[in-house]
Structure formats: structure tokens, C-alpha cells
Image: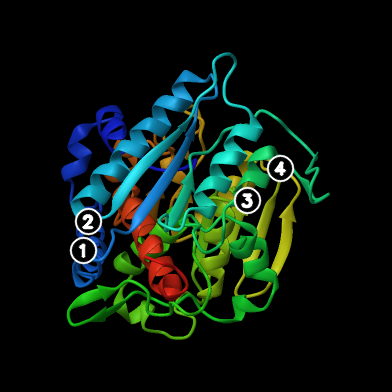
């Protein structure tokens, strides 16, 4: 998961620590805790059964900063899982010279797929992101943009806690007719959030994108979210990121709820205009077009991994929901945003909810496939 939120590091790097205590800064801790309470209840109900087991595969690639980020994320997941009664372990893929190679990583993914006592698998990306394709897999003959794309497809769908393999791919989610069904909200059962209200539907959603959807549901007034089946109809959303991990699945999920989504990356702007409608708005991203999309949107999500990229606060209209998913420096000038934009609701970090929903996906997969496994 590339766009995960490094909570501890970001808290230290925030432009002004006082922003964390302002009224218009949204604290997502309560939502994360509610999700985790449901996970803990599911684990407790299993009694003395063998533990639910999650494996994270971390490759040593030679990039020290990349490995440190992945190790930090792994430690955060391990701590959460331990507290929630889930068995977690990291499988390190080590090499003596220039770093782990593709065959080593693929072998570990296959080992996890075939282990009956492993219920969930995640891989810490990026690994081989410097290699640009097309890459042709020798066994299948299928072309992929990068080797990482193929590795994502290697993870067994019944264990893919990140929802990134071909079975859950956002492009299929949008094109195959599933988009006609709105994303189901989290539901409460006996006062607790039900982890998998539709666990038979076959879909696992990428947890960073899903965390943003759940945060938006928490922030938006009930008068809007209760407008079923398309609660966000008439709402415009700007997403600056179109990765397979974050931007693309998020655009699809919000469009399925009726929103008009401006999906932006450095190469183009696409518009997801409600469920099932897609068009190209521009073949390039320049400041004029970016400013227009930002100014029209009442929800803004940015996850640009560039410390020099900043969205100007005077582009943002009053009463906007602003969500930062950048993993290093925020994509917003937090002080001017909070002091200069009337009624803004700012979410500086999504990491707590992301990790809770990673566990949520694990529970959904375990619940769905428990009768087909030994444990």
C-alpha cells in the first residue's frame, strides 16, 4: 500500500502542531476504534479456535527510505493486530547483494497463498516501481505496466486483504456492471459496526480508498447520506491521485454513490459522472484546470507523493471537506487552510482508519471462506 498514512511521522512533520486541536480538524480515531471493536468481537466469538493469521511480505530492495517506510507501516499493523487478537507476522525477502529479485518475492507470495493457516496476505509496495513496462509474464503471456502489477495479481483473491488483485481490480469494478450497485454502508448490529454486511458479494475494497469513503460518510450530514440509493448525487469531488491503490478505486466508489468525480493525475483529468459514466476532460493537468476542478468541488482528496506539491487554500470554497492522504508532507498549507477557508473540515491523517479497515477486510475474507479452509 503506497499511500498509507504514516501517523507518527506526519504528526512530527505537521506545519503547526496546534492545528491538531482546532475544531475544524476531524479526528478519525473514534471511527477507527468502532471498526476495531467489531473485529475484536468477531475474534472473541471464535473462542479457542486457531488464530486468524495475517502475513505481510516485505522485500529489501536497496532503497533505505522505502524500506523504513514499509517497516514503520508493518509495525503499526502488527501492534493493531496484536491488540485485536489477530496473529500477524512479516515475511522478509532478503538478498545478499543488490536487493530482492522478482522471483524471490513471487515465491513468498505463492507460499502464503498455499499455506492453509494463512488467512490474509498483503505485500508492501512499491517494490520494483522503477521498472516500467510493458512487462510480459512468461507463464501467462499477459502484459503488465510494471512487475508490481503482476505481483498484485499473484495474491490469491480469497486472501487479498488489500483488494488489489485482478478479481477486485477497480477497472473491472467500474466496467462489469457492478458499478450499478451503490457501495453498501457500514451497518450496526447490536450496537456494533457489522464488519461485513454483504460478505457474500465477493468484493474487497482497497483499504486506503475505503477508509476515505467511510470518513466521508462520517462527516457528511445524515440528510445527505440517507438519500439512497445515491447519497452523493449532485456532489462534486476532486481526487488528485489516480493510482490503482488509492485514486482509481476511490473515484469508482464515490461515483457509485452518485458523485461527480474529477480524477486527476499528471497526464490527464477524467470525470466519473455518477455510476457507470466516464469521460476525458483534459489530456494534461495544468494549474488553470486544477484550480477550476478544486474550486467546483465540495470534497477534495489529495495523495500526491511530492513534498513540493501544494494546493492553494484560496482555490478551495467554504464548507469543503478536505482530506490529505500524502504520506510525507501534506498537500495543503494547513495553517492558511484552517484560518482562511470558512467552515472547512480538514482530515490530516487517515492511517488509523486504513489499518482498521485492513483488519476489516481480513475478517470479511475469513468470514466468507471459513467453511472452505481447515482453520
Real-space CA distance between mark 3 and mark 2, rounded to the nearest whole angstrom: 27 Å
Q: Residues within 10 Å of mark 3 (few under 14, many from 20)?
A: some
User: Which of the 4 quarters of the picture holds residue 167?
Assistant: bottom right
Front residue of 49/94: it is 49
**Left or right of 244 in this view: 331:** left
Label for residue 40? 1
Q: Earlier in the sequence, mark 4 or mark 2?
A: 2
Q: Mark 2 or mark 3, which is nearer the start of the sequence? A: 2
Mark 2 neighbour class, 10 Å CA radius: few under 14, some 14 to 19, many 20 or more: some
- Depth check: 116 or 187 in front? 116
Q: Is residue 71 above or below residue 261?
A: above
Q: Which residue is mark 2?
A: 85
Residue at 39%, 36% in the rendered image: 330
The quarter in which the C terminus is drawn is bottom left
What is the secondary structure assignment of the residue under circle 1? Answer: helix
> Marks 3 and 4: which is nearer the front?
3
The vertical placement of 150 against 218, above or below, is: above
Q: Callout 1: few (<14), some (14-19), or many (20+) C-alpha neighbours within 10 Å?
A: some
Residue carrying label 4? 267
Amino acid at each position: 500500500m503506497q499511500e498509507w498514512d504514516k501517523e507518527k511521522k506526519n504528526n512530527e512533520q505537521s506545519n503547526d502542531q496546534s492545528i491538531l486541536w482546532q475544531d475544524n480538524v476531524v479526528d478519525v480515531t473514534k471511527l477507527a476504534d468502532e471498526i476495531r471493536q467489531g473485529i475484536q468481537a468477531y475474534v472473541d466469538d471464535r473462542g479457542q479456535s486457531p488464530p486468524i493469521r495475517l502475513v505481510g511480505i516485505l522485500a529489501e530492495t536497496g532503497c533505505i527510505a522505502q524500506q523504513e517506510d514499509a517497516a514503520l507501516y508493518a509495525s503499526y499493523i502488527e501492534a493493531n493486530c496484536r491488540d485485536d487478537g489477530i496473529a500477524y507476522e512479516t515475511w522478509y525477502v532478503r538478498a545478499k547483494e543488490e536487493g530482492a529479485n522478482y522471483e524471490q518475492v513471487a515465491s513468498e507470495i505463492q507460499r502464503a497463498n498455499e499455506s492453509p493457516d494463512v488467512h490474509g496476505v498483503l505485500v508492501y509496495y512499491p517494490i520494483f516501481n522503477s521498472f516500467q513496462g510493458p512487462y510480459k509474464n512468461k507463464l501467462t503471456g499477459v502484459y503488465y505496466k510494471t512487475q508490481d502489477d503482476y505481483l498484485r495479481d499473484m495474491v490469491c483473491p480469497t486472501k487479498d486483504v488489500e483488494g488489489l488483485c485482478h478479481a477486485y481490480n477497480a477497472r473491472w469494478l467500474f466496467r462489469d456492471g457492478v458499478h450499478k450497485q451503490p457501495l453498501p454502508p457500514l451497518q450496526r448490529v447490536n450496537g456494533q459496526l457489522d464488519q461485513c454486511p454483504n460478505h457474500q458479494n465477493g468484493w474487497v475494497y482497497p483499504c486506503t480508498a475505503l477508509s476515505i469513503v467511510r470518513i466521508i460518510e462520517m462527516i457528511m450530514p445524515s440528510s445527505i447520506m440517507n438519500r439512497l440509493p445515491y447519497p452523493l448525487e449532485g456532489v462534486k469531488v476532486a481526487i488528485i491521485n489516480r493510482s490503482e491503490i488509492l485514486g482509481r478505486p476511490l473515484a469508482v466508489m464515490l461515483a457509485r454513490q452518485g458523485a461527480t468525480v474529477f480524477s486527476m493525475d499528471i497526464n490527464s483529468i477524467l470525470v466519473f459522472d455518477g455510476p457507470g459514466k466516464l469521460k476525458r476532460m483534459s489530456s494534461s493537468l495544468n494549474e488553470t484546470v486544477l484550480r477550476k476542478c478544486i474550486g467546483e468541488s465540495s470534497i477534495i482528496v489529495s495523495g500526491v507523493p511530492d513534498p513540493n506539491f501544494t494546493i492553494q487554500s484560496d482555490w478551495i470554497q467554504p464548507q469543503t471537506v478536505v482530506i490529505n492522504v500524502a504520506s510525507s508532507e501534506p498537500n495543503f498549507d494547513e495553517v492558511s487552510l484552517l484560518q482562511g477557508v470558512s467552515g472547512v473540515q480538514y482530515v490530516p491523517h487517515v492511517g488509523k482508519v486504513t489499518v482498521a479497515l485492513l483488519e476489516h477486510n481480513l475478517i470479511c475474507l475469513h468470514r466468507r471462506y471459513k467453511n472452505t479452509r481447515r482453520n
